[in-house]
Image: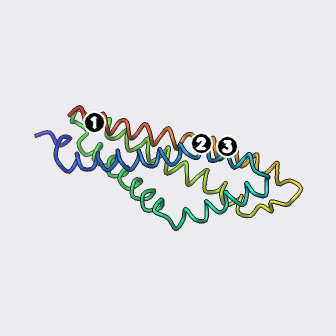
Amino acid sequence: MCVMSSLPVTVLLWAAALSSGLMAGVYFAFSGFIMKAFDKLETTQSVTAMNAVNEVILRSLFMPIFFGSSIISLILIVVGFIYWDEAEAGLVLIAGVVYLVGMFVCTVVFNVPLNNTLSRLDPTSANAQQDWTHYLNNWTMWNHLRTLSSLLSCALCIWLLTNH
């Protein structure tokens, strides 16, 4: 019996595909137009708006999906290692690693520290425009990686679901 096509693995792949797809959509919205819209505002408004988003997101449905999808990616990695000798285990492992590193680790190592720095920024200071531009460029660059990683993991899970 092929464990990769068992019901628990199928449910896991569906959960991974849906949650990573949802996260890819959130990140795409920020990379595609939200950050660009914020940058069209005055610096004080841009900083205030992004800080408001960062504050609200911590108490929203984003957080359980963020952590839940990360846990799912860890489980994908474990399943990939445990059933390594099965044909599709390598792709399961890759889907988990791409998501965990490209979305979760990137968020923790890059985006969150940038958000923390922005929260301490005085939007009326002499360097506010320069600081905002630095934040915008770096945060968005790392957000592009989160978007692509989430999308790639989603695509791998869909491919696995449709080809086993």
Residue lying farthest to the left in this orientation: 1
Image coordinates of residue 96 in percent, x first then y, are: 38, 44
> In what element is the residue under mark 2?
helix
| 3 vs 1, front mark | 3
Q: Residue at x 42, y 57 (%)?
A: 65
Cβ–Cβ below 8 Å for labels 3 and 1? no
Quadrant the C terminus occupies: top left
- Looking at marks 3 and 1 on the same chain, the residue that comes earlier in the sequence is marked by 3
Q: Residue at x 70, y 46 (%)?
A: 136
Above or below, 77 relative to 64: above
Task: Classify residue 46 as left or right of residue 3.
Answer: right
Q: Which residue is mark 2?
A: 31
For marks 3 and 2, give the CA distance. 8 Å
Q: Residue at x 68, y 46 (%)?
A: 37
Using the image as rendered, state which of residue 3 and residue 51 is in the foreground: 51
Task: Classify residue 123 as left or right of residue 113.
Answer: right
Image coordinates of residue 48 in percent, x first then y, are: 72, 61
Q: Which residue is mark 1?
A: 160
Query: Mark 3: few, some, or many residues within 10 Å (few <14, many ≥20)?
Result: few
Q: Amino acid at mark 1?
A: Leu
> In what element is the residue under mark 3?
helix
For marks 3 and 1, give the CA distance. 35 Å
For marks 1 and 2, give the CA distance. 27 Å
Quadrant the N terminus occupies: top left
Task: Classify residue 73 as left or right of residue 87.
Answer: right
Query: Mark 2: few, some, or many residues within 10 Å (few <14, many ≥20)?
Result: many
Q: Amino acid at mark 3?
A: Lys
Q: Which residue is mark 3?
A: 36
Q: Amino acid at mark 2?
A: Ser
- Looking at marks 1 and 2 on the same chain, the residue that comes earlier in the sequence is marked by 2
